[in-house]
Amino acid sequence: MARCSSLSVLLLLTVSTSMSVSTFMATHVGDEAALLAFKAAAISGGYRDDPLASWNGSTGRYCSWEGVRCGGRDQQVVALSLPSHGLTGVLSSAVGNLSSLRTLNLSFNRFSGDIPASLGRLHGLHALDLSHNAFSGQFPINLTSCINLKAIHLRFNQLQGCVPSEIGDKLTGLRVLSLENNNFTGVIPESLGNLTALRALSLAFNHLHGNIPSSLGDITGIQYLALSFNSLSGELPFSLYNLSSLQELQLQKNMLHGRIPADVGSRFPSMRTLGFSGNQLTGSIPDSVSNLTTLQHLGLDDNRLSGHVPRTLGRLHALRHLDINSNMLEADDRGGWEFINSLSNCSQLQRLFLYDNAAFRGELPSSIVNLSTTLQSLCLDGTGISGSIPSDIGNLVGLQLLNVEHTSISGVIPESIGNLGNLTDLYLSNTNLSGQIP
Ligand SMILES: *[C@@H]1O[C@H](CO)[C@@H](O)[C@H](O)[C@H]1NC(C)=O
Ligand SMILES: *[C@@H]1O[C@H](CO)[C@@H](O)[C@H](O)[C@H]1NC(C)=O
Ligand SMILES: *[C@@H]1O[C@H](CO)[C@@H](O)[C@H](O)[C@H]1NC(C)=O
Ligand SMILES: *[C@@H]1O[C@H](CO)[C@@H](O)[C@H](O)[C@H]1NC(C)=O
Ligand SMILES: *[C@@H]1O[C@H](CO)[C@@H](O)[C@H](O)[C@H]1NC(C)=O
Ligand SMILES: *[C@@H]1O[C@H](CO)[C@@H](O)[C@H](O)[C@H]1NC(C)=O
Ligand SMILES: *[C@@H]1O[C@H](CO)[C@@H](O)[C@H](O)[C@H]1NC(C)=O
Ligand SMILES: *[C@@H]1O[C@H](CO)[C@@H](O)[C@H](O)[C@H]1NC(C)=O
Ligand SMILES: *[C@@H]1O[C@H](CO)[C@@H](O)[C@H](O)[C@H]1NC(C)=O
Ligand SMILES: *[C@@H]1O[C@H](CO)[C@@H](O)[C@H](O)[C@H]1NC(C)=O
Ligand SMILES: *[C@@H]1O[C@H](CO)[C@@H](O)[C@H](O)[C@H]1NC(C)=O
Ligand SMILES: *[C@@H]1O[C@H](CO)[C@@H](O)[C@H](O)[C@H]1NC(C)=O
């Protein structure tokens, strides 16, 4: 009896082992077939050595193929990661058969054609990175079935059509949605405000129009929001000023109008880049901007801003770029130039663009020579400044670019300009400078 029962246990064991072996083999065959179909479609032209040379016929070994990672009890493919592999064909719909896939990273290749709808079958997918390819067609709406997605990177492709509002209804676990540099048209769906886990949203460099939905103000943890280089219009919804975690807000080159709220300085304690350039903003630069003390890049250029520049801007100790050119900002001998003096406290300043502000008048403040020696670009062209170039201009030893064209600057070119060993671009035409070039 004892023998018999132990024998049956043994038998049972053998049976169950061989069963699990056969399921193992079955998934193996499915995943391997899908990978081989992927490879066949991904390679075209053969302009260089086979980028997937390790993907060869040794059946059952695909877990060791380059870019393939397996996991789980069944050793199924959980990651397919082949960035920058010179892949030039199309993405086979067979990737939709890799049913345990969590990561698909094919960035920096030359895939073209549609993104297959079969990706919608990958319910475990966490991260999809197809950025920097030549994918065309529409956003694969089927992807909204992948409700576990945390990151979608599709930037730098040629996708067109609208940004589907289903993204906002279904993919509520998303932390990153990057669709920049495509050909998306239409409006920004209001539903994106449902994506409250988002940390980064980029829709920049597309052809989107209409208003920015105020629902985006619901994404309270967002750190990076880029909507620049579209055709967005209307006022910036006030709700966006509630996004206190923002570190970068990129809104350049749209058609936004309205004023910057007076209390902007108390709303973004972590802001590093504030990009409002190339819009139609009016009013003055609020004094409170000086309270955004983490700011490194302030881009307010190419708007219709007027009034004086806040005299306390020098409180922005981390400031590197200050672009306030191409506005209607004002200063003259009675006041308005104090900010130059204050900027001498910005010890990392690299770029100061004041050009094309005709209402910057009066003598160029001599305290300009006290700006940081890190300054590389100083552009004053197209302003109404007069007076002379301060004799200590040579203090600004980091200068590479100095432009005072089309101003009323007069007098002689100071000899100390010879100290500017890194100066490569010096523009002095259409001024009233006289004398010799030292
Ligand atoms: C992918 O799965 C489908 C449906 O299960 C099947 O018809 C197809 O042959 C599979 N493709 C590959 C390449 O394994
Ligand atoms: C198959 O790939 C392995 C590496 O995974 C490589 O060592 C071997 O040379 C390859 N065989 C052929 C025929 O390309
Ligand atoms: C994909 O791979 C590239 C290159 O290694 C990497 O920079 C990128 O972060 C990866 N994408 C994701 C979503 O992890
Ligand atoms: C689209 O996704 C659904 C849901 O996962 C799936 O049933 C369907 O097969 C997918 N479509 C294609 C063409 O794979
Ligand atoms: C994308 O848009 C640009 C500019 O509108 C256009 O030149 C280009 O042909 C478009 N590409 C595609 C794939 O539609
Ligand atoms: C998503 O947002 C839209 C518009 O803001 C709203 O009508 C819809 O109910 C939201 N959907 C979910 C699932 O929360
Ligand atoms: C901003 O947040 C405050 C406090 O949380 C809230 O009362 C207010 O309604 C919000 N404003 C907008 C425009 O969303
Ligand atoms: C800057 O912040 C300080 C301290 O929070 C506050 O007292 C001051 O009024 C703010 N300045 C402006 C111009 O808003
Ligand atoms: C520079 O900062 C110091 C200390 O914060 C301050 O006392 C001084 O007035 C500032 N200088 C200018 C020119 O703003
Ligand atoms: C430059 O700064 C120094 C030290 O703070 C000061 O003594 C000097 O007057 C300033 N020069 C100009 C031209 O403002
Ligand atoms: C001049 O340029 C060189 C090379 O870019 C750099 O290493 C050096 O620090 C610069 N000098 C100054 C004074 O900024
Ligand atoms: C140079 O000075 C002359 C005479 O003062 C004036 O007419 C002319 O407009 C000035 N040129 C510039 C570019 O400011």
Image (cartoon, rainbow, N blue to C red):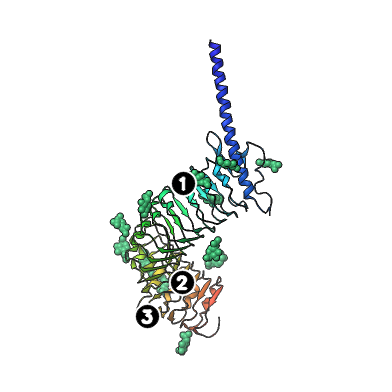
- Mark 1 residue's CB less than 8 Å from ligand 4: yes
Residue occupying the point 53% across, 86% down = 435
301 or 150: nearer the eye? 150
Q: CA distance from mark 2 to mark 3?
A: 20 Å
143 or 432: nearer the eye? 143
- Residue position marked by numbered label 3 in the rendering: 333
Q: For the residue marked with disc 3, what is the amino acid?
A: Asp
- Residue position marked by numbered label 1 in the rendering: 145
Q: Which quadrant is home to the C terminus? A: bottom right
Q: How many marks?
A: 3
Q: Quadrant of ligand 8?
A: bottom left
Going from the N terminus, do you reach mark 3 or mark 1 first?
Answer: 1
Can the viewer see residue 200?
A: yes
Q: Quadrant of residue 47?
A: bottom right
Residue occupying the point 38% across, 51% down = 196
Locate residue 209, reporting x and y percent: 43, 64
Q: For the residue marked with disc 1, what is the amino acid?
A: Ser
**Label 1: how many Cα within 10 Å (few below 14, some 14–19, many 20+):** some
Locate residue 211, reporting x and y percent: 39, 63
Going from the N terminus, do you reach mark 2 or mark 3 first?
Answer: 3
- Residue position marked by numbered label 2 in the rendering: 353
Residue occupying the point 34% across, 62% down = 238
